[in-house]
Amino acid sequence: MEILGGPFFSVAGAGESHGPGVTTIVFGCPPGLKIDRQTVQQYLDRRRPGGNKHGTPRNEKDKVVFLSGLYQPDHNALLGPSKISVTVEDSVFETEAYECGYSTGEPIAALVLSTSKKSGDYTQFIGPGGQVRPGHTDLVKYHKSQGFVDIRGGGRSSYRATITDVVGGSIARIFLQQHFQTVLVSSINQVGDLRAKVSLAEKCQALYDQFRDEKGPTVIPAGAIAELQQLIDQSEIPSVDADFATQAGELIKETRKDGDSLGASVEVIALNVPSLLGDPLYNSLKARIMGTLGGLNAVQSCEVGSGKSVVARRGSENNDPIRRTGYTSNTHGGLLGGMTTGMPLVFEVGFKPTSTINKPQQSVSKDLTEIDFELEKGRHDPCVGVRAGVTLESRMAVELMNAALSQRSQSLAEGCLVFLGSPIPSAPRDQRDHKVMGAIWEARAKLCPQPPLRLPPPAPFQLRLTHED
């Protein structure tokens, strides 16, 4: 079973590219989290096909409706104007959908319909004699499923399946923002051989230095992050470097006319991340994030911090100096030993050129007969990186929320009855440890703008045996 995240917070989905719709089920969301459909919709709008002129011509509205897991006493606010209508055997069934409510702790189900499909464009790929598109999963999925595979638009392997990532990731983002002021941003910094001169990592480090707190952990204000996001959104393609974005847009346009495609590199960064999240070795947060980002469609590489450029450095050049207020640089990308350090989490993800192109290629049919392949019809992204940013942010958010809930679980196991940001119940061994741990917990408290999530103490376990004569 394919599940994003887990074991504490996980996201499951179903639906193919040309199916009726894509469903999402979110498990493990703590009760009491306020979720507004419009907030989730804003993230989906960034992902949807047709939302950017440099993306696929397929134009889906991708309106999300929630079916379960939310509640509030004001039913008018809970239900809102959203409706679901289904026609079965000449009968029309209609019901309300949730608009705004609080999570109940039960699974949260969501649905996005697919309404802009041209399945007739895929007849050349159907059946044992169907042609195989180079670079796609057509051949392996056909034989693995013994021929029972939906080939239209790539089926389940389509980028459309990432609707699930964004819906689940949106809920994780709401949680992270409400509890820690954590915000995720992304920016394209390379298209083809064209590289941006200004990076998102540089912009975020400048913000961190600008708002560095000498008395505790640094929290970048939401307004400053919003200005950065606005700069990215206003560019020709999502990038902090407006000049690069304009040139990249022209390059994508010319490449599309030529029937070809381009690769891209995307930076994704999490700001205001609490320190001490994650574990070393086999449950390393670095490994989990790299795995979930690297598992996205078309991803060919994933780097953290300064990435592979550190290979050419010496240790004296690569180590990040440490002050009482934190690290003065961020070569490590916010993670050391698989755990967060309080610095921005910095990742860079490389995407291959879109496999679907309008040029003659060498391929085979599904019965392995060699053919000269040429695409007859179809709609595709000339550069998949253009729409990928919000999906990368969403996947990282799921892993961060899972790590936060894992930390809570560990605290409970140790007898701590409150969430991150609250005092440790047991006294330290000496006064020096007391000061250090006090500073750590004060730092956590500053990152938790809302009251900590208080949990009732566990009831004492009692075993009673009744003997009957």
Image (spheres, rainbow, N blue to C red):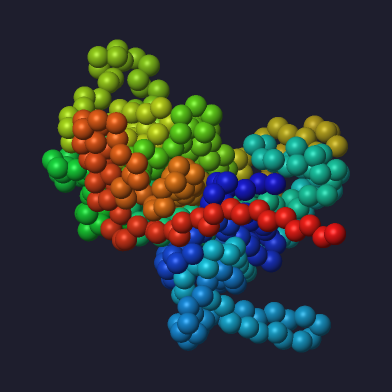
Question: Does 413 sit above or below residue 19?
Answer: above
Q: Residue at x 81, y 82 (%)?
A: 89
Q: Position of residue 383 (x, y in %)?
A: 49, 45
Q: Position of residue 412 (x, y in %)?
A: 46, 48
Q: Is residue 161 above or below residue 428?
A: below
Name which residue lies at 58% across and 53% down: 461
Number of callouts: 0
Residue in view at x 46 percent, y 56 percent: 457
Quarter of the image where one finds residue 449? bottom left
Q: Nearer the viewer, residue 392 or 373?
A: 392
399 relative to 231, above or below: above
- The x and y percentages for residue 336 are 37, 29
Residue 392 appears in view? no
The percent coordinates of residue 375 (x first, y second) are 67, 46
Q: Nearer the viewer, residue 273 or 57?
A: 273
**Which of the pair 314/338 is nearer the observer?**
338
Q: Residue at (30%, 28%) from the top-left corner? A: 331
Q: Is residue 178 left or right of residue 381?
A: left
